[in-house]
Image (cartoon, rainbow, N blue to C red):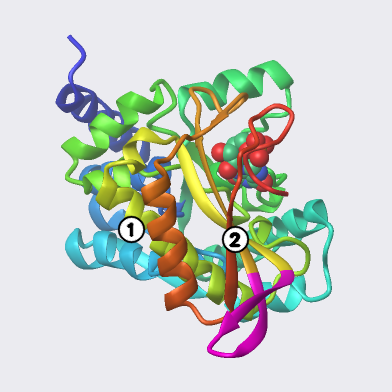
Amino acid sequence: LWTPARIIDDQVDRVRELVGKRKVLLALSGGVDSSVVAALLHKAIGDQLTCVFVDNGLLRKNEGDQVMKTFADNMGVKVIRVDAEDLFLGKLAGITDPEAKRKIIGNSFIDIFDEEAAKLTEVEFLAQGTIYPDVVESADTKTGKAHVIKSHHNVGGLPETMKLKLVEPLRELFKDEVRKIGLELGLPHSMVYRHPFPGPGLGVRILGEVKKEYADILREADAIFMEELRNSGWYDKTSQAFAVFLPVKSVGVVGDARRYEWVVALRAVETIDFMTARWAHLPYELLEKVSNRIINEISGISRVTYDVSSKPPATIEWE
Ligand code: XMP
C-alpha cells in the first residue's frame, strides 16, 4: 500500500545503503522538490548532507531567510548560504535579451555551486530533486543528461570534472506524492504547496535589463499580491501567480503634482500542465485591494495592470 510514511522509510533505507558513510551535496533552491530531497536526506544521513543555497538577488521577498529558518534553524540541516547578489547583478548589467539573461543566471549559478563544492572535502554524491515527469521528459527529448540541476533545468549541467554520483530519491514519484512526503517529513504546508518559481527568478520578471532598484520594487509588489491571494483563499485556487516589473513610466497624481513612476503587471493563471493556461478570473474586489496597496505602499509604482492573456498564444511568464 502506498503511504507517504512507507515511501519515506523505503527511500531512507535505499539512500543509506547507497551512500554509506560518504558525503552528499545538494543545491537547495527552496522549491518543492529540492526541499523535499533535503528533508528526506537529512532524515536518512543527517550531517553527511551539505546543502548549498545561492541567493542570486533575484529571489522573492524574505525567501533566503525563510529557507535558512526552515532547514538550518528548525531542522538542523547543514546549509551553506551564498550571498551572490552583487555577482549576478553585475553580470546582468546591460543585458536585455531574455535568453542571454537566462544563460548568465544559469552559468553563474553553476560557477558558484562548483566553487562551493570544491571547498568541501570528500563529497562523492550529488543529490537532485528529479521527479518522475522530469525523467519521462528527458527520455522523450534525449536532452536529459544525468547531471542537470533540476531547478535550473535551462542550464546545461555541472562541469564533467565534478564526477559526482547521483542520488535522486524522488525519481519514481509524481508531484502530488512528493508533496505528501514533504508534509510527512514536517515541511510547512506553505512550502510544500508553493507555486512553481522559475530558476532565473525575478530575472525574467523584470523585463529587459535587470537592476537592483527594479528587483527591490518588484519583490515588494509581489509580496503584497501573494499576501492578498493567501488571505482571500485564492492562492490555492491558482496554479501560478506573480508580479512583473515593466520598465516604463506612467503618470500618477500625488497632491497637485504629476509624477511619472514605474508600472507593474499582475499575472495569475489556472493550469494543469503549464502547457496551456487560462488567466485566473480573480474577483475585482481582490484586484482592487492589491492595486491600492501596491500603489499606496510602494513608492516608485504609479500603475498596476492585470494580465488577461491565456496560453497559448501568450506564455505564463512575460519573457
Ligand atoms: P511559460 O512562460 O513558458 O512557462 O509559459 C511555463 C512554466 O515554466 C516556468 N519557466 C521556467 N522555469 N526556468 C525555469 O526553471 C526558466 O527559464 C523558465 N521559464 C519559464 C514558468 O514559471 C511556468 O511555470
The answer to whether 225 appears left or right of 187 in the picture is right
The majority secondary structure of the magenta stretch comes to strand
Tell me, for residue 94, which label it has, or none: none
**Label located before the other in sequence (2 or 1):** 2
Residue under the point 58% across and 74% down: 301
Q: Residue at x 50, y 26 (%)?
A: 271
Q: Is mark 2 within 8 Å of ligand 1?
A: no
In this rendering, is residue 40 above or below 173? below
Amino acid type, residue under disc 2 in the picture = Leu
**Of circles 2 and 1, which is in front?**
1
Q: Which residues are magenta?
A: 248-262
Residue 227 badge:
1
Q: Where, by quadrant of the figure, is residue 296 drawn? A: bottom left
Residue 179 in sight in this render: yes
Seen in the image, is 200 located left or right of residue 280? right
Mark 1 Cα shell of 10 Å, populated few (<14), some (14-19), many (≥20): few
Q: Indicate the amino acid at tag 1.
A: Glu
Which residue corresponds to the image point at 51% horizontal and 64% vertical from the top-left? Answer: 59
Q: Which residue is under mark 2?
A: 202
Number of other residues with Cα within 10 Å of mark 2, as a class: few under 14, some 14 to 19, many 20 or more = many
- Say which element carries label 1: helix
Secondary structure, mark 2, is helix
Residue 103 in the image: x percent, y percent?
76, 55
Distance from label 2 to label 1 (Cα)? 18 Å
